């Protein structure tokens, strides 16, 4: 299979903050690839390096065979880009902007086709300043595809949308991918990645911590069972069984242990409790968290990390 | 850059010019200010200063008498040329660099050179529009004499060199603008100062020599002098530095500014300064 994007050892720092910490990535042509991760994980930095907006501090990048940092003009003729925020020309209409954009590409589709694809035909002659948020976003999508690009970048295409608008936007994106282009999508919504992407890269604190399809992600994240309970306030932690001494402590003081041998760990915990005169372990729970929960756990982690890094 | 690419850049520059003009034309307020400001200046100054220009004793009787309006129209037109290209362009670019408009444009395959061509093309159209309106007003309301054939020709090349010189400077200066809010201040300060020392509001030769020197480093002073040669009787060159119109120097300085400014602009221009 052809490779659309490859990058190795890509790093980027902003002052003291590391945005990307040695990222390696291979994306096959014709694929929809979702870069999934919480805010501040490095998604936008990564995608903007691929688009040529940002310079990397280290590493190699090839996008459709071009180095985006040095050959941006040549690369731009083959890609479509939807930025994280849209800024349409206020006094121009979608039709006028699309007619203009089409002329910048070698083999564009016609404007009506692009309008139809994003469901903007009715509003084709409305000025940019009069478009709703969702319509502006569709306009961005139309602009990104009108040149029949080989590669489309979508940076958080549905952030700020309500549920219905997101569903509609997904349909639009599926329409785009049906045309055979490679799509790189960033999102912090797990379900968005699940609905749209064949392959998912999970990014956290500037590193890709998982790559694979949704089934693999499910397997990777949700295999562990979680035992959790609420220790009494006066408990001497050093008396706990070894595996409990360095576990995750929740905001409410709850201890939780992800494990693949739940029965064994539970036995040890019960033995410990009875030998310490605890008849009933407070709020004991044994559960198998779903994918969404595991993802939120990761997101929370990073949010806490980010908060800690900020002065 | 290959010939095909160069051709494409120029063609797309034209396409982008038309788009920008359409966008402005849809915004009557912007259009109004572009045209109204220099005209207001013309009206106010021509109404305030109704005297005739001083003629030195030795030249009395040999040169025709000229009103201040006739002198001032050259300066205010120079100011309009430089204002539209340098000042207006610089401010609007800076705002668009911070609000994401240009970042969005950079997502398309519009080459940077086409973008620059588009800015120059747009400024040229505004300038011609402004000058035409001022000319009509000047003739009708203030009895200004229209240039002769030679004068029109001189005016044409001064516009064709002056506007790009101002534009590339306007693009280049955006490199030092720290925020969208600061843009008007950063652009306005040099523009106002240059107007005062470049012979727009006062006769240039009445300035101290050192100020003439400083003004001589920038395009406005040369555009103004070139236009005086268009609007004043030839005999008035006695009041110019070196007692000639220095049209060769006007052309040289503007051309040098285009080259220097363009290099600066290409080197320092950024589509996005918001992050």
Image (spheres, coloured by chain):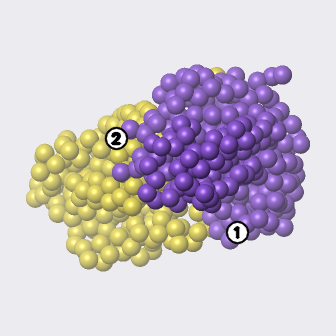
Q: Residues within 10 Å of mark 1 (few under 14, many from 20)?
A: few
* Image point (68%, 55%), residue name: A285
Q: Secondary structure at mark 1?
A: loop
Residues B230 and B111: in front is B111
Image quadrant in which the N terminus of chain B is located: top right
Q: Looking at the rendering, which quadrant does residue B249 occupy?
A: top left
Q: Chain of mark 2?
A: B
Q: The chain coloured purple carries which letter?
A: A
- Give the Cα distance between marks 2 and 1: 51 Å
Q: Position of residue A211 (x, y in %)?
A: 71, 33
Query: Horizontal placement of B170 versus A224: left or right?
Result: left
Q: Can see residue A50?
A: no
Q: Which mark is residue B250?
A: 2
Q: Position of residue A106 (x, y in %)?
A: 78, 35
Q: Looking at the rendering, which quadrant does residue A258 occupy?
A: top right
Q: How many marks do you count on the picture?
A: 2
Q: Position of residue B213 (x, y in %)?
A: 18, 43
Q: Which is closer to the viewer, label 2 or label 1?
A: 1
* Image point (53%, 50%), residue name: A276
Q: Secondary structure at mark 2?
A: helix
Q: Which mark is residue A146?
A: none
* Image point (79%, 47%), residue name: A194
């Amino acid at each position: 299979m052809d490779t659309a994007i490859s990058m190795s050892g890509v790093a980027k720092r902003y002052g003291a903050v590391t945005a990307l910490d040695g990222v390696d990535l291979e994306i096959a042509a014709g694929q929809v690839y979702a870069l999934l991760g919480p805010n501040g994980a490095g998604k936008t930095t990564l995608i903007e390096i691929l688009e040529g907006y940002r310079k990397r501090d280290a590493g190699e990048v090839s996008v459709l065979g071009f180095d985006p940092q040095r050959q941006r003009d040549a690369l731009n003729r083959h890609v479509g880009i939807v930025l994280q925020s849209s800024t349409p020309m206020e006094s121009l209409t979608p039709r006028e902007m699309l007619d203009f954009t089409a002329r910048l590409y070698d083999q564009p589709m016609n404007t009506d086709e692009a309008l139809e694809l994003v469901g903007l035909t009715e509003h084709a002659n409305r000025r940019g300043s009069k478009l709703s948020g969702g319509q502006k976003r569709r306009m961005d999508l139309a602009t990104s595809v009108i040149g029949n690009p080989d590669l489309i970048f979508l940076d958080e295409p549905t952030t700020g949308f309500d549920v219905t608008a997101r569903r509609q936007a997904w349909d639009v994106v599926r329409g785009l991918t049906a045309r055979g282009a490679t799509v790189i999508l960033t999102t912090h919504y797990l379900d968005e990645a699940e609905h749209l992407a064949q392959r998912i890269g999970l990014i956290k604190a500037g590193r890709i911590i998982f790559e694979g399809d949704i089934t693999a992600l499910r397997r990777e994240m949700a295999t562990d069972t979680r035992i959790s309970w609420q220790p009494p306030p006066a408990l001497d932690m050093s008396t706990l069984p070894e595996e409990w001494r360095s576990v995750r402590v929740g905001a409410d003081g709850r201890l939780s242990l992800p494990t693949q041998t739940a029965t064994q760990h539970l036995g040890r915990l019960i033995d410990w409790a009875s030998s310490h005169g605890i008849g009933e372990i407070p709020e004991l729970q044994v559960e198998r968290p779903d994918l969404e929960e595991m993802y939120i756990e990761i997101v929370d982690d990073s949010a806490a990390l980010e908060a800690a890094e900020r002065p | 850059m290959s010939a095909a690419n160069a051709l494409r850049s120029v063609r797309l520059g034209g396409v982008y010019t038309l788009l920008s003009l359409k966008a402005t034309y849809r915004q009557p307020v912007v259009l109004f200010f572009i045209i109204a400001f220099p005209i207001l200046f013309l009206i106010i100054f021509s109404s305030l200063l109704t005297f005739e220009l001083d003629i030195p004793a030795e030249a009395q009787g040999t040169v025709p008498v000229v009103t201040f309006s006739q002198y001032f129209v050259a300066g205010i037109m120079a100011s309009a040329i430089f204002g539209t290209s340098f000042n207006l362009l610089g401010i609007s670019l800076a705002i668009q660099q911070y609000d994401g408009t240009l970042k969005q444009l950079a997502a398309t395959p519009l080459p940077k050179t086409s973008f620059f061509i588009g800015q120059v093309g747009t400024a040229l159209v505004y300038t011609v529009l402004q000058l035409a309106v001022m000319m009509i007003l000047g003739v009708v309301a203030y009895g200004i004499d229209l240039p002769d054939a030679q004068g029109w020709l001189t005016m044409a090349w001064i516009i064709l060199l002056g506007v790009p010189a101002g534009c590339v400077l306007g693009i280049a200066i955006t490199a030092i603008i720290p925020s969208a809010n600061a843009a008007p201040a950063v652009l306005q300060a040099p523009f106002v100062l240059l107007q005062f020392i470049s012979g727009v509001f006062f006769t240039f030769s009445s300035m101290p020599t050192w100020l003439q020197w400083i003004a001589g480093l920038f395009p406005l002073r040369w555009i103004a002098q070139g236009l005086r040669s268009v609007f004043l009787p030839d005999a008035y060159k006695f009041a110019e530095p070196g007692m000639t119109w220095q049209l060769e120097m006007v052309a040289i300085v503007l051309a040098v500014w285009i080259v220097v400014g363009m290099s600066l602009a290409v080197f320092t221009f950024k589509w996005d300064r918001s992050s």
